[in-house]
Image (cartoon, helix red, strand yellow):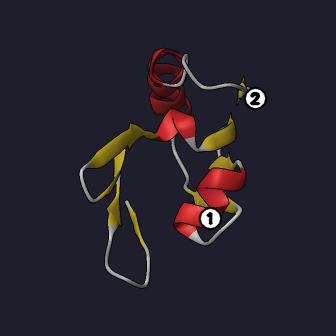
Amino acid sequence: MFYRSSGSEYGIWTQRGREQRGLCEIIKEVVLNRSCLECVFNERGIAETGINTLTILYGISEGLWQELAPTAERVFRGFTDFKLID
């Protein structure tokens, strides 16, 4: 999860007052590879999060990558532009 300076929490859903939206509405592109996950926000996402790109770096084994890649494809299937780089 990531936080705005106002303390609003963003996770699988963003919430402002009573309005609730899925992250797929504010993410322009998701790129996943063996060493990082990168989310590029659209204009509305930039306005809500205060950032244009969120990059998460990690190190995983080959076996774990083989499990993660198909699951990530299912999770991110609804996003406008999802790229899985093997």
Mark 2, residues whose alpha carbon is within 10 Å: few (<14), some, or many (≥20)?
Answer: few
Residue that label 1 marks:
47
Mark 1, residues whose alpha carbon is within 10 Å: few (<14), some, or many (≥20)?
Answer: few
Residue 7 relative to residue 34: left or right: left
The amino acid marked with disc number 2 is Ile
Residue that label 2 marks:
85
Residue 79 - label: none
What is the secondary structure assignment of the residue under circle 1? helix
Q: Which residue sits furthest front?
A: 18
Q: Earlier in the sequence, mark 1 or mark 2?
A: 1
Query: From the image, which quarter does the C terminus lie in?
Result: top right
The x, y position of residue 14, in whole percent, is: 37, 51
Identify which residue is drawn at 57% across, 58% down.
Answer: 56
Residue 12 appears in view: no
Q: Nearer the viewer, residue 64 or 79?
A: 79
Badge nearest the viewer, 1 or 2: 1
Identify which residue is drawn at 54% across, 18% down.
Answer: 78
The x, y position of residue 44, in whole percent, is: 63, 53
Residue 72 relative to residue 13: left or right: right
Residue 4 drawn above or below residue 34: below
Classify residue 27 by image quadrant: top right
Identify which residue is drawn at 55% across, 16% down.
Answer: 77
The amino acid marked with disc number 1 is Ala
The x, y position of residue 79, in whole percent, is: 60, 25
The x, y position of residue 21, in whole percent, is: 39, 40
What is the secondary structure assignment of the residue under circle 2? loop
Residue 85 relative to residue 23: left or right: right
Classify residue 25 by image quadrant: top right
Identify which residue is drawn at 47% across, 15% down.
Answer: 74
Q: Nearer the viewer, residue 9 or 66?
A: 9
Query: From the image, which quarter does the N terminus lie in?
Result: bottom left
Q: Nearer the viewer, residue 32 or 40?
A: 40
